[in-house]
Image (spheres, rainbow, N blue to C red):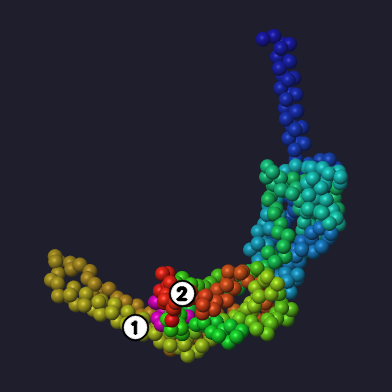
C-alpha cells in the first residue's frame, strides 16, 4: 500500500470521527447559547432531589380553567375544587416521580403555529389539548404544558413562556377530571363481619337479613310472608356487601347535598360491635349516600367474651396435650448413657393475650373497635358521596326483590301448569 493511499485512509477516518462527534452533539439538549446544557438533560432539573419539598400542584386545562388544585397542609394533601377533601397521594406522587425522572430526548418545534400538532399550544383557547402543571414549594417556579403522547413513546412538553418544545422520556398522562385526584376509598367492612342488615324504606317497610352465628355461610331473610320463599341465597347475601371495599365516584360537602324527605336508611351491624348507618337517595340519575358509625358496646362485649372463651378452651386443650405427651415421655426408659431430649424438656404452650390478661385484652379490643368507628366518622361526617349504582342497588331492596314471584292462577281458580304456590 503506497503512502498516498495511507494518507487517504487516515483522512477518511478523521472525517468519520468528526461526523460522529457532530451527530452526537446535535442530539443532546442545547442551552440558549447553543452549547450542550447538562443541567437541562432532565425536564425539571433538581426535582429528583426535592420531590418531598413540593407542597402544591395546580393543573389547568383549556380556556385556562382550573382542573385541580392540590395543596399539602397539616392534615395531608387535599383538593380545593372538592371542598378540600383528601387527595389520592399515591396518584400524586406517581406524577411527581415521573416528572422528576423525565429526560429530554429531542428538541421539537419552536413555531407556535405547529404547537397544536403536539398538543402544547397556549391554554387560552377552548380547544387546547394540553394540561398545564404548576409546582409550588421548590426553589424555582415550575410551569409545564404537557401535550400529546408520542406514538413511539414519551410525551411532548413545552415549558410555559418558552418557545421551544421537547419530547421527553416519561409517559405523562395527566388526568383531566378533578374527582379522579381524590382518595376514593370510604370504608371496607367485609360481608363475613356483618351480623345483620336492616333496610328501612321511605314508606316505613323494612327488610332485614341476619346470621345466627359468625360462621354461618349465608344470611337469612326475616319476616318472610306466609307462602313465599326467597329467590336465592345470592340475592339475600347481596345486602351484606354494600360496605365491602366501598369507593365513591364523586364527593360533595354534606351541606351542599342533603338527603330529601324520603331517603333509604340502612343499618349494618357487625359481630364485633361496629355499627354503620347509611342514608341513601337517588337524584338526577346519581346515587348519593351519607354515612356515620357507632359502637354497640353490649354486642362488642359479648363478642370479646366469646373470643376469650374460645381462646381459653383452645389453650387448655393444647396444655392438656402437652402434659400428656410429657408424662408419656417421662415413662420411657433412657436409651444409652445420655438420655435424648424429651417433650418434657420443652416449655408449655404460651398463653394467648385473651388468657394471659383477659381484662387488658378486653380493654384493647374495645379501644380498637371504638377507634375504627371514630376514624370512620372523622373521614365521612361532613361529606355526601356519589356511590356506584350497583352499591346503591344493594341498599334499595324490597321484600319482593328477594322473594320468588307470586304464581298466577287461571280464571277457573286452578293453578296454571307453571304455578307452584300462590299463598
Residue visible at 68% across and 78% down? Answer: 383
Segment colored magenta: 209-217
Q: Position of residue 373 (x, y in %)?
A: 56, 82
Residue 213 rendering spot, x and y as whole percentages? 40, 81
Please tell me how crowded label 2 is: few (under 14), some (14-19), or many (20+) other residues with Cα within 10 Å: few
- In the rendered image, the residue lying farthest to the bottom is 298
The residue most toward the top is 2
Secondary element at tag 1: helix
Q: Position of residue 106 (x, y in %)?
A: 75, 42
Chain-order first, disc 1 or disc 2: 1
**Marker disc for residue 312:** 1
- Residue 354 versus residue 104 in the image, above or below: below
Instruction: From the viewer's perspective, tell me whether residue 21 is left or right of residue 193.
Output: right
Judging by the rendered image, the residue that carries numbered circle 2 is 410
Q: Is residue 364 visible?
A: no
Residue 257 is left or right of residue 203, and the answer is right
Residue 411 in percent (x, y) is at 47, 76
- In front of the other: 270 or 363: 270
Q: How many marks?
A: 2
The residue depicted at 86 percent of the width and 45 percent of the height is 113
Query: Does 51 lie within the magenta span?
Result: no
Amino acid at each position: 500500500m503506497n503512502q498516498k493511499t495511507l494518507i487517504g485512509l487516515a483522512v477518511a477516518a478523521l472525517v468519520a470521527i468528526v461526523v460522529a462527534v457532530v451527530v452526537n452533539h446535535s442530539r443532546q439538549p442545547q442551552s440558549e447559547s447553543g452549547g450542550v446544557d447538562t443541567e437541562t438533560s432532565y425536564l425539571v432539573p433538581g426535582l429528583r432531589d426535592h420531590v418531598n419539598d413540593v407542597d402544591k400542584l395546580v393543573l389547568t386545562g383549556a380556556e385556562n380553567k382550573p382542573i385541580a388544585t392540590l395543596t399539602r397542609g397539616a392534615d395531608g394533601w387535599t383538593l380545593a375544587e372538592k371542598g378540600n377533601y383528601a387527595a389520592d397521594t399515591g396518584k400524586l406522587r406517581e406524577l411527581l416521580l415521573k416528572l422528576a425522572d423525565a429526560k429530554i430526548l429531542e428538541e421539537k418545534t419552536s413555531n407556535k403555529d405547529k404547537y397544536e400538532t403536539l398538543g402544547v399550544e397556549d391554554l387560552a383557547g377552548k380547544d387546547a389539548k394540553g394540561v398545564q402543571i404548576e409546582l409550588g414549594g421548590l426553589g424555582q417556579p415550575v410551569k409545564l404544558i404537557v401535550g400529546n403522547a408520542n406514538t413511539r413513546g414519551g410525551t411532548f412538553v413545552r415549558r410555559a413562556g418558552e418557545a421551544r418544545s421537547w419530547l421527553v422520556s416519561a409517559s405523562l398522562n395527566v388526568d383531566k377530571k378533578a374527582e379522579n385526584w381524590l382518595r376514593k376509598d370510604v370504608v371496607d367492612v367485609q360481608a363475613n363481619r356483618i351480623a345483620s342488615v336492616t333496610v328501612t324504606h321511605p314508606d316505613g317497610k323494612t327488610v332485614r337479613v341476619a346470621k345466627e352465628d359468625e360462621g354461618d355461610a349465608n344470611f337469612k331473610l326475616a319476616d318472610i310472608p306466609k307462602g313465599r320463599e326467597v329467590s336465592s341465597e345470592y340475592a339475600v347475601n347481596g345486602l351484606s356487601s354494600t360496605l365491602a371495599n366501598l369507593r365513591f365516584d364523586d364527593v360533595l360537602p354534606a351541606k351542599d347535598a342533603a338527603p330529601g324527605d324520603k331517603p333509604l336508611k340502612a343499618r349494618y351491624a357487625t359481630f364485633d360491635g361496629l355499627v354503620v348507618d347509611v342514608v341513601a337517595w337517588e337524584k338526577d340519575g346519581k346515587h348519593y349516600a351519607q354515612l356515620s358509625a357507632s359502637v354497640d358496646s353490649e354486642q362488642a362485649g359479648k363478642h370479646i367474651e366469646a373470643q376469650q372463651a374460645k381462646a381459653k378452651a383452645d389453650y387448655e386443650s393444647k396444655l392438656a396435650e402437652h402434659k400428656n405427651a410429657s408424662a408419656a415421655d417421662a415413662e420411657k426408659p433412657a436409651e444409652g448413657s445420655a438420655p435424648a431430649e424429651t417433650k418434657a424438656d420443652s416449655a408449655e404452650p404460651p398463653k394467648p393475650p385473651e388468657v394471659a390478661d383477659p381484662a387488658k385484652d378486653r380493654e384493647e379490643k374495645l379501644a380498637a373497635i371504638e377507634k375504627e368507628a371514630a376514624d370512620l366518622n372523622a373521614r365521612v361526617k361532613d361529606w355526601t358521596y356519589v356511590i356506584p349504582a350497583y352499591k346503591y342497588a344493594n341498599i334499595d331492596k324490597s321484600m319482593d326483590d328477594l322473594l320468588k314471584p307470586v304464581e298466577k292462577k287461571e280464571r277457573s281458580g286452578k293453578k296454571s301448569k307453571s304455578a307452584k304456590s300462590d299463598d
